[in-house]
Image (tube, helix red, strand yellow):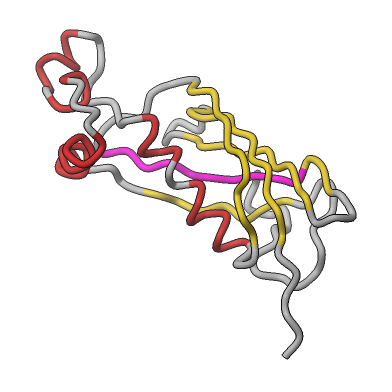
């Protein structure tokens, strides 16, 4: 998504097919954050934590845990719509993001039903503008209660 394309952030208008979700940056992912994530998640694969091992595998820095990056989609979507519930999130990890890098999230509405069910296409791009994660989310929009 380019900077000159309009995007929806916290609007009361119902989402329509093709609507874009604004871009957001998450990161940079510091090595200390990877170590904390490894401790709480139990994913202590040395590739994420040991720089020498990451370099031996061809990386300049430790790759960021895929699930850590995937977790960034929830606050991203909540910034777009406070009244949504994510019912499904699936992803393909296409290229690594390394410690010290940030990701840029963007998305758009693929499908919208009259019952406030949406299917979203989501992207996480690395600093080289390559798609690191291609994701799809199913969400429900809660109907606001009258005041």
- Residue 80, image quadrant: bottom right
Q: Decide which of 65, 140 is in the foreground and name it.
A: 140
- Magenta: main secondary structure: strand
Q: Position of residue 32 (x, y in %)?
A: 15, 43
- 128 versus 21 height, above or below: above
Q: Which residues are magenta?
A: 100-109
| Magenta highlight on residue 105 | yes
Q: Where the C terminus falls, by quadrant?
A: bottom right
Relative placement, left or right, of 37 versus 86 is: left
| Magenta highlight on residue 19 | no
Relative placement, left or right, of 115 versus 89 is: right
Taking the spot 50% from the left edge, 35% from the top edge, the residue there is 125
- 31 versus 82 height, above or below: above
Relative placement, left or right, of 16 versus 83 is: right
Q: Position of residue 59 (x, y in %)?
A: 25, 17
Taking the spot 51% from the left edge, 53% from the top edge, the residue there is 24
Taking the spot 66% from the left edge, 53% from the top edge, the residue there is 21
Q: Position of residue 23 (x, y in %)?
A: 57, 52
- Residue 14, image quadrant: bottom right
Relative placement, left or right, of 35 versus 116 is: left
């Amino acid at each position: 998504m380019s900077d000159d394309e309009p995007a929806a952030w916290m609007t009361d208008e119902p989402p329509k097919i093709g609507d874009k979700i604004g871009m957001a940056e998450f990161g940079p992912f510091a090595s200390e954050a990877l170590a904390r994530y490894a401790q709480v998640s139990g994913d202590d694969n040395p590739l994420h934590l040991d720089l020498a091992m990451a370099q031996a595998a061809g990386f300049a820095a430790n790759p960021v845990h895929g699930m850590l990056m995937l977790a960034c989609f929830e606050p991203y979507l909540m910034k777009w719509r406070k009244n949504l519930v994510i019912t499904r999130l699936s992803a393909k990890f296409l290229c690594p993001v390394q410690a010290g890098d940030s990701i840029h999230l963007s998305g758009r509405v693929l499908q919208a039903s009259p019952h406030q069910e949406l299917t979203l296409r989501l992207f996480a791009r690395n600093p080289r503008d390559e798609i690191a994660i291609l994701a799809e989310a199913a969400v429900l929009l809660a109907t606001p209660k009258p005041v």
